[in-house]
Image: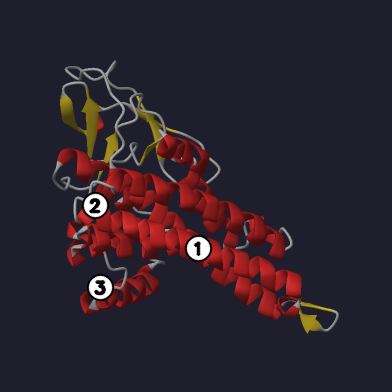
Amino acid sequence: MEFEFDEDQRLLQRMVRETVTKSRSLPEEQLWSIYLELGWLEAGPVELAIVLEELGYAADPTPFLATATWFAPLAGRLPRGSGTGVFDGVGRFVLDADRADEIALLTSEGVVVRDGKDVPAERLSVFDPTLHVAHVDAPDLVPGVPDLVAGVPDLALMGLAVSTVGSCRRVLDLVVAHVKQRQQFGVPIGSFQAVKHKAADMYVAIERAKVLAYFSALTIAEDDPRRGKAAAMAKAAAGDCQRVCFQHGFQLFGAMGYTWENELQIHLKRAKSGDLLLGTASEHRKALLV
């Protein structure tokens, strides 16, 4: 497998980056319409990873991640609008379940797709107020739905991993810009060796997680038998990455990065949620030992 993007993929990366930069201040409905019009939901696994990394970098508020990587791999098609999937066996902490047009449920008798209005979902109050996470009361309150079973799609793990990488990239960029401007003893704090080491640690963690996320995307694209392990490795590496970036990013901003006035807190929360959803880094490392 080759890790180099081809010319079309590099062009897609530039196009996505430019589009997201120009449109990030638009309302969610307009953003969603742009993504649909550009056909991003129809991208293959590697191209989808490129899109998700850039959306993670911008802390995208739309249900794109859940629709592309939670609903689509279960239902085998794109939803009529937005969608999400329930595949943990209990319906807890389901991304965008409170606003999905369609919800795919992984049951003991196969995948069942229901209209979002017919599936009781209660949005949870979490540390990231821009994130839509809900508990789904299925199958008890949904007529005709058998018992739920566990079985997380590889694409869902890869999607969360590469989105977390995007969030961590943004954290690093904000930190580097800050330490170049903030001065102590008459010089930028970025000139101090300890600060450089922390920034370097963040960069190394991001690159490691990024490589594993794209390796996971490649194994999914080629239906490689290693795809399950690759997805778990990517999710674990992304969790380790966010831990390094959260700790160093928070410290190098002198804690003010966690205030509501600073953009950093948004990306720190997104990165943290990327680790917690669908299992933390330690859980996936344990799964690799089985």
The reply, left or right, for residue 196 in relation to residue 78 is right
- Residue type at mark 1 is Ile
Of labels 3 and 2, earlier in sequence is 3
Tag 3 residue: 9
Of labels 1 and 3, earlier in sequence is 3
Q: CA distance from mark 3 to mark 2?
A: 17 Å
Of labels 1 and 2, earlier in sequence is 1
Within 10 Å of disc 3 (Cα), the crowding (few <14, some 14-19, many 20+) is: some
Within 10 Å of disc 1 (Cα), the crowding (few <14, some 14-19, many 20+) is: many
What residue is shown at x 74% (from left), y 69% (from top)? 194
Q: Is residue 137 above or below residue 255?
A: above
Tag count: 3
Q: CA distance from mark 1 to mark 3?
A: 20 Å
The reply, left or right, for residue 275 in relation to residue 213 is right
Tag 2 residue: 220
Q: Which mark is residue 12?
A: none
Q: Is residue 90 above or below residue 19?
A: above
Indicate the secondary structure of the residue bearing disc 3.
helix
Q: Position of residue 100 (x, y in %)?
A: 27, 41
- Cβ atoms under marks 1 and 2 closer than 8 Å: no
Tag 1 residue: 206
Q: For residue 58, say whether it is visible.
A: no
Return the residue nearer the eye: 109 or 56. 109
Q: CA distance from mark 1 to mark 2?
A: 21 Å
**Quadrant position of residue 284:** top left
- Cβ atoms under marks 3 and 2 closer than 8 Å: no
- Residue type at mark 3 is Gln
Within 10 Å of disc 2 (Cα), the crowding (few <14, some 14-19, many 20+) is: many
Q: For residue 57, say whether it is visible.
A: yes
Q: Position of residue 30 (x, y in %)?
A: 29, 61
